[in-house]
Amino acid sequence: MHLIPLYLVLLFPQGVLVPAGTRVEARLQSSVNTRTSAVGNEVLAVLTKPLVAGGIPVAASGSRLHGRIETISGATQSSAGRVRIVFRELEFRDGRRTPVWVTESYAASGPNRTVRSVLYSGAGGIAGAFIGGQRMRAAGAIGGGLIGFIIAINSGSAKLPDLTLKRGQVLHLRLGEDLSLKQIPDEK
């Protein structure tokens, strides 16, 4: 570790400030699943790119983020699984640690029901037109299409998907508050 160079001390006597909102990219070292994980479970990630402030690397890639699951919800019939992870400590490669607030929320993608809706609506419309005969063909097609659509959106799995963040997955995070450092580690 070395002190901040003299010219930076003169420019920034209070140290280096990494502003809130700065992007942080890290590789997950533990997995998270909305079906099996719980609030408070520890989460570990490793920076894949250096954390830079004003062109100065303040944390090298390979530095560790220590955090936990802040909120978690398993999938239900009306809501996909989602989780919020908060990293509260940055461990530099030299072992030194500093408090940090890095966070992000993730949600599972719901199923794409577009194809099912189109197929069911089309089949319902054709069946309705056939049943309606010559005189009521348009009304039968509209009614059959609506019935097909209603069946499509209410069929399928009983609940939406759970979310899994796999070990090794790259997370795109943000600093939730300013990070102020008096010294910069020498991590070359």
Image (spheres, grey):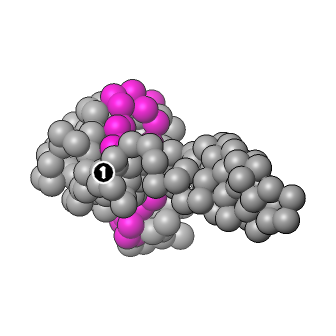
Question: How many tags in the picture?
Answer: 1
Does residue 175 sit above or below 62 in this rendering? below
Q: Is residue 11 left or right of residue 182?
A: right
Query: In this orientation, does residue 103 appear?
Result: no
Residue at 55%, 59% in the rendered image: 150
Q: Position of residue 91 (x, y in %)?
A: 26, 43
Asked if residue 173 is among those painted magenta in the image, a careful observer would answer yes
The C terminus: image quadrant:
top left
Does residue 169 sit above or below 15 in this rendering? above
Label 1 Cα neighbours within 10 Å, binned few <14 / some 14-19 / many ≥20: many
The N terminus: image quadrant:
top left
Q: Is residue 129 left or right of residue 6?
A: right
Q: Position of residue 110 (x, y in %)?
A: 48, 49
Q: Position of residue 133 (x, y in %)?
A: 80, 56
Residue at the top extreme of this rendering: 168
Q: Position of residue 171 (x, y in %)?
A: 44, 43
Does residue 115 sit above or below 10 in this rendering? above
Looking at the rendering, the stretch of residues picked out in magenta corresponds to: 161-188
Does residue 97 sit above or below 175 in this rendering? above
Query: Which residue does the numbered mark 1 point to in the structure image?
Result: 75
- The part of the image, by quadrant, that contains residue 140 is bottom right
Label 1 sits on a secondary structure element that is loop
Residue at 53%, 70% in the rendered image: 11
Query: In this orientation, does residue 171 appear?
Result: yes
Q: Nearer the viewer, residue 123 or 162?
A: 123
Asked if residue 160 is among those painted magenta in the image, a careful observer would answer no
Residue at 38%, 53% in the rendered image: 80
Query: Amino acid under label 1?
Result: Ala
Residue at 15%, 48% in the rendered image: 38
